[in-house]
Image (cartoon, rainbow, N blue to C red):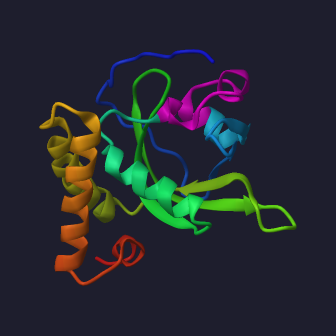
Amino acid sequence: MREFTVDPTGRERTFHENDIIVSKTDLKGIITYANQTFIEVSGFSEEELLGQPHNLIRHPAMPQCVFQLLWDTLEAGDEIFAYVLNMSKNGDHYWVFAHVTPTFDQAQRILGYHSSRRVPDRKKVNMFADLYETLRNEEMRHRDWRTGMAAAGRMLTDVLASQHVTYAEYMFTG
């Protein structure tokens, strides 16, 4: 697997509201399929994407606790919706509204994961950008990344509890 290291540019990329970014991964999050929109928006070639961990496009401002929630949900066999800040090959960022689902075999064993990402609602992006900044700051406050992720995860749980919603409901409230 190749390492790509780039600093965020602060420039935002967008894609057409009718386009859908699609990718598939194996059980370990290794990319097995990337559609043309994913290739174009991420700035990576298909060859650079396939066989790489999906976190290749993770923006450093994304809280780890959100990805922990995502993986916990998927490994339980459930789908998840999430606003995600990604980073392209050149360091530009792009927001997506992601719908991630497990892929099952005939015996209902999870084979991998399928993600469809759409252009997000800008009002929601602003709301999630603020929340994610708070969560990421909490993560960074701790010396140990696991302790920081757990603390930020508790903060997220508290936010949801204060609004009497689940994470899934929070995605669609407003």
Residue 12 drawn at (x, y percent) = 37, 37
Residue 154 drawn at (x, y percent) = 22, 60
Q: Is residue 154 magenta?
A: no
* Figure quadrant of residue 138: top left
Q: How many discs mark residues in the rendered view?
A: 0
Residue at 22% in and 52% down: 152
Q: Is residue 137 left or right of residue 43?
A: left
Query: Which of 139 and 46 lies nearest the eye of the viewer?
Result: 139
Residue at 65% in and 28% down: 49
Whether residue 119 is visible, yes or no, is: no
Q: Main secondary structure of the magenta part?
A: helix
Furthest-bottom residue in this view: 164
Quadrant location of the N terminus?
Answer: top right
* Figure quadrant of residue 87: top left
Q: Is residue 88 left or right of residue 101?
A: left
| Stretch in magenta | 40-57
Residue at 32% in and 24% down: 9
Residue 68 drawn at (x, y percent) = 41, 51
Residue 86 drawn at (x, y percent) = 43, 40
Q: Is residue 119 left or right of residue 166?
A: right
* 71 relative to 108, above or below: above
* 148 relative to 48, above or below: below
